[in-house]
Amino acid sequence: MAELNQNSPDILCAEILADARREREEILRCAEQEAATMLAAAQAEAEKIRDETQAQARSEAARRKEMTLATVAVETGKLRSARVEALLEAVHAEIRRRLLEQDPEARETVVALATEALCRMPGTQFVLKVSAADQAAFGLELPQEIARRTGRPELNLTVAADGAMTGSGVTIQDASGLLFWDNRLLSRLERLWPELRRQIAVQTSLTGENSTTGGTP
């Protein structure tokens, strides 16, 4: 039997091939481990990005929802305010229309309004102005009737027509021209309207008790 020569080319070649195979397998094993590690890291990063993206999307959606709700609330408030204002203006216009209608109690209205003003005005001589229609309808006894109603017989009253006056009522000026009282119905409406519109709005539930619907008269 021939003795094996450890230095023969065949043996050396076999050892080299075996080393190469072992090195290849080690390289493949390391590559597979590194690939698995990289894949796991990539998957973790992808999940992190996905979670962050979803969180940002939810946050943005919530922010947009809040903005939308806030915008809706503001626009609803504007529409409601405009509607309330339109309704109140309609009430105001209706009151004015009625005040401009012919008043079957116009004489009593003028006497009452003149009496109210004169009871608060010092002096004895006054000029009372009424509409031309009222002057023609009431006659010459109007000053005496007003003075009697005030309980001040010393009053010297002159009734004159104001061609520009509309509606019922009276304006009063003293002889010195320093005191003046506009007690026409339309003028009283404008003075009292801020408080009236507030009361109308509250009593009809158009606004809350503390809502601002006008100033004081």
Image (cartoon, rainbow, N blue to C red):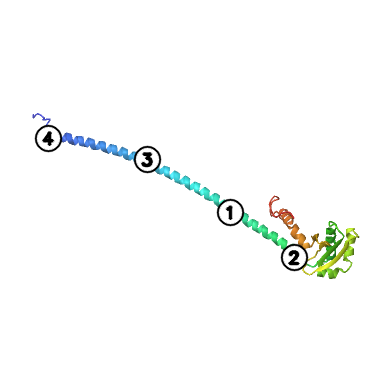
Q: Nearer the viewer, mark 4 or mark 1?
A: 1
Residue at image coords 26%, 37%: 27
- Say whether disc 4 or disc 2 marks the residue closer to the N-terminus: 4
CB under 8 Å between discs 3 and 1: no
At label 3, counting other C-alpha atoms closer than 10 Å, the crowd grade (few under 14, some 14-19, many 20 or more) is few
- Say whether disc 4 or disc 1 marks the residue closer to the N-terminus: 4
The amino acid type, in three-letter code, at marker 1 is Val
At label 4, counting other C-alpha atoms closer than 10 Å, the crowd grade (few under 14, some 14-19, many 20 or more) is few
**Which quadrant of the figure has residue 186?**
bottom right
Element under disc 2: helix
Q: Nearer the viewer, mark 1 or mark 2?
A: 2
Q: CA distance from mark 4 to mark 3?
A: 47 Å
Number of labels in the image equals 4
Question: Circle 2 is placed at which residue position?
Answer: 97
The residue lying toward the viewer, choosing from 54 and 146, is 146
Residue 67: x and y, percent?
A: 55, 51
Residue at image coords 65%, 58%: 82
Residue at image coords 81%, 70%: 132
Question: Circle 1 is placed at which residue position?
Answer: 72
Q: Nearer the viewer, mark 2 or mark 3?
A: 2
Q: CA distance from mark 1 to mark 2?
A: 37 Å
Q: CA distance from mark 2 to mark 3?
A: 83 Å
Question: Circle 4 is placed at which residue position?
Answer: 9
Element under disc 1: helix
CB under 8 Å between discs 4 and 2: no
Residue 58: x and y, percent?
A: 49, 47
At label 1, counting other C-alpha atoms closer than 10 Å, the crowd grade (few under 14, some 14-19, many 20 or more) is few
Question: Circle 3 is placed at which residue position?
Answer: 41
- Say whether disc 2 or disc 3 marks the residue closer to the N-terminus: 3
**Which quadrant of the figure has residue 87?**
bottom right
- Say whether disc 1 or disc 2 marks the residue closer to the N-terminus: 1
**Which quadrant of the figure has residue 194?**
bottom right
